[in-house]
Amino acid sequence: MKRTTIHIFAAIALLLGLAACTQDEAGFLPEGAEGTPIVFTATGLNPAATAIAGTRAPADGNWTGVQSVAVLMDGMVKTYDVTPSTADPTSATLTSTDPYYWTNHKDITVTAWWPYTEGETTPPAVKVKANQSAQKDFEGSDLIVANGQTVTYGSPTLRFTHRTARVAIVLTDYTEGLASVQLTGLSTEGDNPDIIVPYDKGSNTYTAIVAPQSVAAGTAFITCTFTNGKTFVYKMKNATDWQAGGEYTYTVSLAAAKDLGYTIESDGSYTVTSADGLMNIAKLVNGGKTDINITLTADIDLTGKDWTPISTSTRNFYSGTFDGGGHTITGLTFTTNDEYAGLFGWLSKAGTVKNVVMEGIQITSNQIYGGSIGGVVGTSWGTIENCSVSGSVSGTVYVGGVVGVQIGGSITGCSSSATVKGMVDVGGVAGQTNSSATLTACYATGNVTSTGSSTGYVHIGGFLGNNYTTVTACYWKNNHEQGIGYNKKSTKATKVDGTGVTWKNAVDAMNTALQNAGSEWRYELNGALPTLRKL
């Protein structure tokens, strides 16, 4: 692939020439006259007409589509209508039914801008549209301004400059159908979009107006998706500043397009279709896209993959929704020295992980100073729902089959048959729960082991290691007689012993709890252990 040299178009000066009425020989207004109405002539849209570095033509290079501009003088804003020249659309006449007037020869200070929204008294903050696929939205994102300029009587000239940059993408070397083109990884400063759908100018050229910003080397800023599901991502080779008034053109060969394993939907969510896709999604979240919504549309086999948990620290706390869609993730095997490990390392209060089966996982943390390790999440402040785990989870402190530590939030309808091993606060479903977290209709069947006992400082339980929260209709059946190692609440987990309490009893109680919680899931007992189904 190839990136063209960045082209900074020649400067644009929108010269506003006053069409003044005839004055007396001394240059003064006739006695008793109201003044001369100011009629502007806007020119200079052709980039070849000027040579001011760092400026360019407006979005379309002419005034077509621009209905009006705002002109601020003496604390008052008036609207001037734009009439493009039929002979030369790069120039226009600006008139108003309520114009300003020259009443003396003193210099005046003028600010003018476009686009203009009624009621504005100053140029708006630079904020471009996320979807610029329509020409009006593309053009409407190109903000121009003549800011606080001094205008002299007899030569009332304003020089407009662009407050945005323009990115042009020229695509080559592809034969497959193109489903979408997006600019991605953009700065969200000033509430600007991180993804922009550009305007299709035809001839395989797509253009977008962006807020001025710095783009780091390695940023995946162009994403092309084909109709066959393949996705091509073009990364910035060298760090680049997109400056106001600049145009930056990239010619991209799609000959090497490959399937990244995920697609970006129109709402900005990510759909994952393969193991590589999930690996790439983890990189995106760990790189800063912490609030994206993620959905699996296929089973994922991570066998042989070097897995790094999604959200490895508080710096990239995951706050989106991960929906496994009922699919199964197999082959997740890794050993780490990190403190927080699982499918996810951290889950924020706003985050949700749901509807995923973790099968045959092998997670080992050698962190000797603590941390939290879980099959689904290491440390969770959020919501975990309808997740099941099998395999093995091993760590030091705060180790659970589903979650290492649950701080607030909730765990609902989750189960673990994984073997769990740790030293302090170790449990079949969770190592520790606190801060008003709730556990509802969950169960554990995998053996739980620890170097300590279930008394004293070391807390170990067949269901939960150390509990400071509410446990409702939760069960365990494994090598432990004690369901909760250390329990600061009056609620408890119940052991399924096969006589006094059976899995049928457990299913009835868990379904009642799910119903009371407003859940759309219910357990059924078609085999040895309960499974969830959606109502």
Image: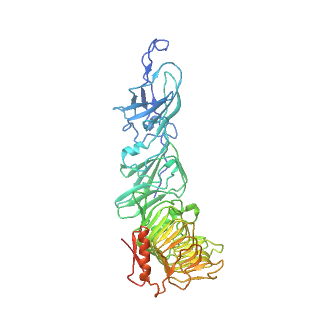
Total numbered circles: 0
Along the horizontal axis of the image, is 243 left or right of 61?
Answer: right
Q: Is residue 257 visible?
A: no
Question: 272 and 388: which one is in front?
Answer: 388
Q: Quadrant of residue 481?
A: bottom right
Name the outermost residue toward the bottom.
499
User: Quadrant of the rendered structure where residue 456 is?
Assistant: bottom right
Which residue occupies the foreground of this view, 466 or 135?
466
Residue 277 in picture, x, y percent from top left: 45, 67
The residue sitting at 49% across, 21% down in the picture is 154
Q: Residue furthest front?
A: 490
Q: Is residue 473 visible?
A: yes
In the picture, the quarter occupied by the C terminus is bottom left
Where residue 334 appears, as percent x and y from the top left, is: 55, 75
Could you say where residue 214 lies in the image, as x and y percent from the top left? 54, 50
Residue 423 coordinates in the image, percent (x, y): 63, 79
Q: Quadrant of residue 512?
A: bottom left
Image quarter in which the N terminus is found: bottom left
Query: Which of the colour schemes (rainbow, by chain, secondary structure, one colour) is used?
Result: rainbow
